[in-house]
Amino acid sequence: ARVPKGRRQRIADNRTRKMSSCVMPSSSLTSRIAPRASSSSSSSSRRRSARRAPHVARAAVDDPSATASAPAQGTSTATKKLNTDWQIDFCSRPLKDDRGKKVWELLITDDDRSFEHAEYFPNNRINSVELARALERVMEERNERPKRFKFFRAQMQTIITRACNEVDIAPLASRRCQTLVTWLGERVETVYKKHPGYDANAPPLMAFEASAPKRLPDALRGESWAFVALPLVGVREEMAQVKRGKVFGALLDIDEDLPDDTLIPGIAVYTSRAAALAGWTKGLELACISVDTQTSSIVLETGVNDSWSYAFFRKSKELTQEAKEWEQVKRACNGLHFLAIQTDEEAETTDGFWILQDSAPSEY
């Protein structure tokens, strides 16, 4: 079923407009996304399944030089090869050891946070060899090997990539490490600030530094696009299709307490080759979308520091205002937004749907 008129909302108003100057690369700006819809969505289908109580393995809080690992998960001789990713972070923390030297830490978890591994490293053991040994040890103790190791710090890409290659696990530079970043934020308050070696004057580390936008490859271009918005209930319906494998896409967790009528902004891309475009887009590790009013462009950020000129719009007062309002709505829901790909504005279904979040990097 099509989205009922009462649910089809613009950001600025409730009118349908077409603007031939807003194109990707040259077509009309339409005003809606038309996903599957029902009048409501049951709360049970929107709630995440209860997570298992996480096993936590970490170094002693009062001994940054110590190391720790998860206990062995049985004695099976066959290592389980997972089809899921693990998220890792390897970076200095706002802590100093008894020599006054910076303490580094390795964090490992999975998307569901079904386990946690935390391990401190002295600053004279910061290299890919030591990291590879630690990764191999954790995999052996858990008797599991992930599909990929995801990491979000571009500045650590060389060390992490070499270590991943050493243990024969693919590395993936990605800002979609939501679980790990959440855990890291918790550790700032529950571990680091309570540690006797905590350095309150330590500067924030490794902010995202996106490169200058590059030209988007032709294979990733649609025929037209639109600033759109959907109430959260409609977003959850699209997310369900991604979870079932019906459409291409990738998801992030959304606050369960957010009301169903919360307006979530997005970019809808229309093209007759929607399935192919969605497939190509799946090959990118999408991070977020932003508006650059100075260049009248839509910027797509991928990986940890890549960016692309995704689309352009005519520089006019009306369109610039619409772009600013889109960004305002995005900020109002903590950077949450989406990218949708479908054949046209009237399509009953989407071919690709990605949940994105434009958020500040981790403090440490």
Image: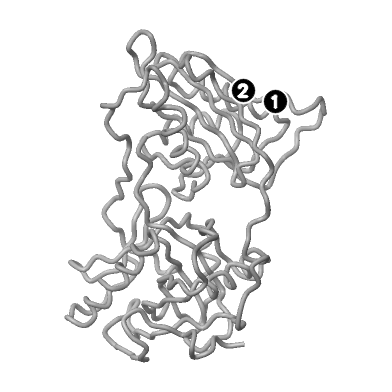
Distance of mark 1 from mark 2, alpha carbons?
Answer: 8 Å
Q: Which x, y percent locates residue 171?
A: 52, 40
**Image: 276 above or below 287:** below
Q: Are circles 1 and 2 on residues that touch, CB within 8 Å? A: yes
- The quarter holding residue 270 reads bottom left
Q: Which residue is mark 2?
A: 69
Figure quadrant of the C terminus: top left
Most distant residue in the top direction: 99
At a point 73% along the width and 31% down the height, the residue shown is 143
Residue type pointed to by label 1: Glu
Secondary-structure class at tag 2: loop
Q: Which x, y percent locates residue 80?
A: 75, 37
At a point 42% along the width and 27% down the height, the residue shown is 192
Q: Residues within 10 Å of mark 1 (few under 14, many from 20)?
A: some
Q: Earlier in the sequence, mark 1 or mark 2?
A: 2
Figure quadrant of the N terminus: bottom right
Q: Which residue is mark 1?
A: 141
Q: Which x, y percent locates residue 325?
A: 28, 73
